[in-house]
Amino acid sequence: MRFLQRIINSLFLILAANLPLLDHYLLPSGAGGILIIAVILAGLLFLNICPSAFSRRLPKKQLRICADGCELLICFLISASVSVIGLICMITVLFPGDRLLWILDLVCVIVVEAVTFWCGILRIYLTSSQIGMKWRVIGIVCGWIPVIHLFVLFRLIGIASEEWKFESRKLLHAQERKEEQLCRTRYPILMVHGVFFRDFKYFNYWGRIPKELETHGAKIFYGNHQSAAAVADSGQELAGRIQEIIAETGCEKVNIIAHSKGGLDSRYAVSCLGIDAYAASLTTINTPHRGCVFADYLLGKIPAAVKEKVADSYNAALRKLGDENPDFLAAVSDLTASACEAFNQKVPDRPGVYYQSVGSKLGAASGGRFPLNFSHHLVQYFDGPNDGLVAESSFPWGEDYTFLTAEGKRGISHGDMIDLNRENIRDFDVREFYVNLVNDLKRRGF
């Protein structure tokens, strides 16, 4: 049925685009011809307003608009191809005797197809998050290059189509299992960010993950600590935040999910500041438990004056964004392999707290976004296989360890593990991974 509707849509476009030829050769004269033209134009208008009846069934308006945009662009490609072939064939019939009719038909094809194209491309540009800035720019630049623009358009349609289908399945699946409350754990979830980021109100460090967890019943809190500080100082902030949550909710304990340096900060709070009494579990995500050898190298090679200048610039910028006392150098120094070796000896795991860890591998530098695509090579040289920032060997900690990768060369980066770029990765659904992770905590009684 969907294929049939697409054929009908394309047919209306072809007829509307070639009205001059249609009127000249096939339509009856008088009221009958005018009626047929009116029906074709009405069909064209309706097509551009509501391209597909099937998209009405999609669970979200944004996805319906995106699906409509894809449908229009597919119909545009079909009808434009047929119209161009038809115009080429008609050259031998209409030239030189009736070239004006051919020119009028060409103008009509250009106008109708342009309207359809722009109605489609604007829909997907305004609603698709997966196209991203890269392909939007490529689309604008290559849209003026013959032949290449067709390949780009196919790619844009492919990305947007994959997105609305995937997101629709996720929403429908979430509705089907809503009553199960998969993520309604006994204790709330505290999500702890890594270094050089903050918990901003309008840009969530954890991407689409918290919303997905809340949809399945989770109660979420955030660390709200500074972006860059020594592990001990960040741990102190987290300890205060946990006690604040306990006092506010009366929940007795929390389940900590911490990313990157946040895992070290959380371990310190649990082991050295008495937070083990308030922590049911600690899950570390891509945390450098054994530090980064390349960080030792950089700190040893970069001149002191340069380090101080970089640190001062960063600290000044972060004060404006809300940090009270940021310390760039202290944060970086605590991530070195030498510092983490000493840290692990002084910060033992506490009994009664469930520790587990997760790590991932970035298969190729090109799979990561800047700066991870750059740092991947550096970490590879000093530490071996990595996620663009932290070595595989540094991830494992606790009773259970989960290692993640994806088929193909891309892999899963340090940023992908927190949905930083809101990118749908083939073979790895980061939101579903966290739903399963929290559901496991629920099944364990946490």
Image (tube, grey):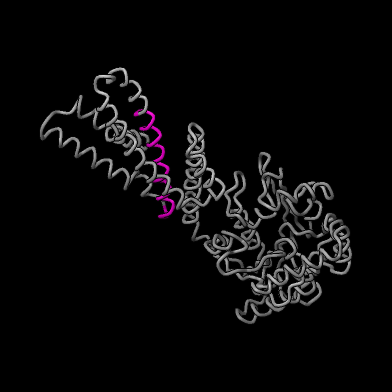
Count the marks: how many? 0
- Vertical position of residue 153 compared to residue 349: above or below: above
Tell me if residue 67 is in the magenta stretch: yes
Return the x and y of residue 290 as percentages of the image width and height. Answer: 83, 58
Q: Residue at x 61, y 59 (%)?
A: 439
- Tell which of 237 and 266 is nearer to you: 237
- Tell which of 87 and 183 is nearer to you: 87
Q: Is residue 336 left or right of residue 284?
A: right
Quadrant where the C terminus sits is bottom right
Q: Residue at x 76, y 49 (%)?
A: 386
Q: Which residues are magenta?
A: 59-83
Return the x and y of residue 366 as percentages of the image width and height. Answer: 68, 44
Residue positioned most to the left: 30
- Vertical position of residue 106 compared to residue 293: above or below: above
Q: Is residue 414 left or right of residue 98?
A: right
Quadrant where the N terminus sits is top left
- Vertical position of residue 246 compared to residue 390: above or below: below
Return the x and y of residue 101 as percentages of the image width and height. Answer: 25, 27
Return the x and y of residue 385 as percentages of the image width and height. Answer: 78, 46
Q: Residue at x 62, y 54 (%)?
A: 433
Tell me if residue 203 is in the magenta stretch: no
Residue positioned most to the top: 92
- Vertical position of residue 115 compared to residue 280: above or below: above
Magenta stretch, main secondary structure, is helix
The image quadrant of residue 279 is bottom right
Residue positioned most to the bottom: 247
- Tell which of 357 and 104 is nearer to you: 104
Residue 270: tell me if it is visible.
Answer: no
Q: Is residue 12 left or right of residue 230?
A: left
Residue 339: tell me if it is visible.
Answer: yes
